[in-house]
Image (tube, rainbow, N blue to C red):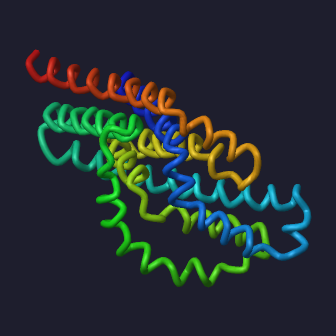
Amino acid sequence: MPGPVDQVYLTALLVGLMGGVHCVAMCGGIVSAFSLGMPTEVRRDSSCMLLYQVVCNLGRVIGYTLIGAVFGGLGAIALGAGPFRTMQLTLYAVAGSMMVLLGLHLGGWWQRLAVLERMGLVLWRRLQPTWRHLLPIDSIHRAGLVGLVWSLLPCGLVYSVLISAAATGSPISGAGVMLAFGVGTLPNLIGAGLLAGAAARIAERNWIRQGAGVVVIAFGLQALWRAGADAWS
């Protein structure tokens, strides 16, 4: 499914980028705790602090990518669990449906992704002791580990994109989807400086968010139409 997968990549990138306000609201406290958890000498050196922030966020993106590979593998297992064509069309329809829901969320027309976040709180409660154990962040190595744990923070956007990653039916494609999403989140979460603030202000503009939502919805409807057409052919 090369065409649909390419669209899922672009959708994941848009969701990560335009969901910036949601990301800042969800993770702003973590970013602050991360910064305050650095040694004083690091906080006083802007270039060193930026390096720590970049490494932490790269750890987060790597975590997303690994989880995407796992979900893509689960999708591959699903493809082998029944008639290949039927399962492929089912996964394709799931991906299209998730694109439509994500587009509605981005455009501000549907805000139910918090339900998925509540489902993930059970896992996060188990991981919080590990998070606290990694503080203070006094080395680059520890910053990367914090980023990996951060990737498991309950987030409706992350979980929704993971469903699309599973729908690709491939570990490699699933990893690519989550990598694209992670890259999209970087402008809003890499530090608390001017870049993040500017990106968040841009993402807050209704016409930009709604435009991105319409594009993602269009991708989803196209995927659903193609799944239906293939099913009847």
Residue toward you, 76 or 36: 36
Q: Nearer the viewer, residue 103 or 67?
A: 103
Position of 123 with respect to 221 (left or right) is right
Q: Quadrant of the C terminus?
A: top left
What residue do we see at 36% from left, 41% from top? Answer: 105
Residue 205 sits in quarter: top right
Q: Is residue 152 visible?
A: yes
Quarter occupied by the N terminus? top left
Q: Residue furthest left?
A: 232
- Side of 72 where 152 appears, left or right: right
- Residue shown at 51% from the left, 50% from the top: 65
Where is residue 63 drawn, in percent x and y? Answer: 54, 58
Q: How many marks?
A: 0
Q: Is 208 located above or below residue 115 in the figure?
A: above
Q: Is residue 168 visible?
A: no
At 35% across and 75% down in the image, what residue appears?
Answer: 122
| Residue 130 coordinates in the image, percent (x, y) | 55, 80
Query: Extreme top residue here?
Result: 233
Classify 3 as above or below 106. Answer: above
Q: Is residue 171 above or below residue 209?
A: below
Q: Position of residue 92 (x, y in %)?
A: 25, 33
Q: Quadrant of residue 48?
A: bottom right
Residue found at x 54% / y 45%: 20
Q: Which is nearer the eye, 143 or 200?
A: 200
Residue 165 image position (x, y, % from top left): 38, 44
Is residue 61 found left or right of 175 in the rendered image? right
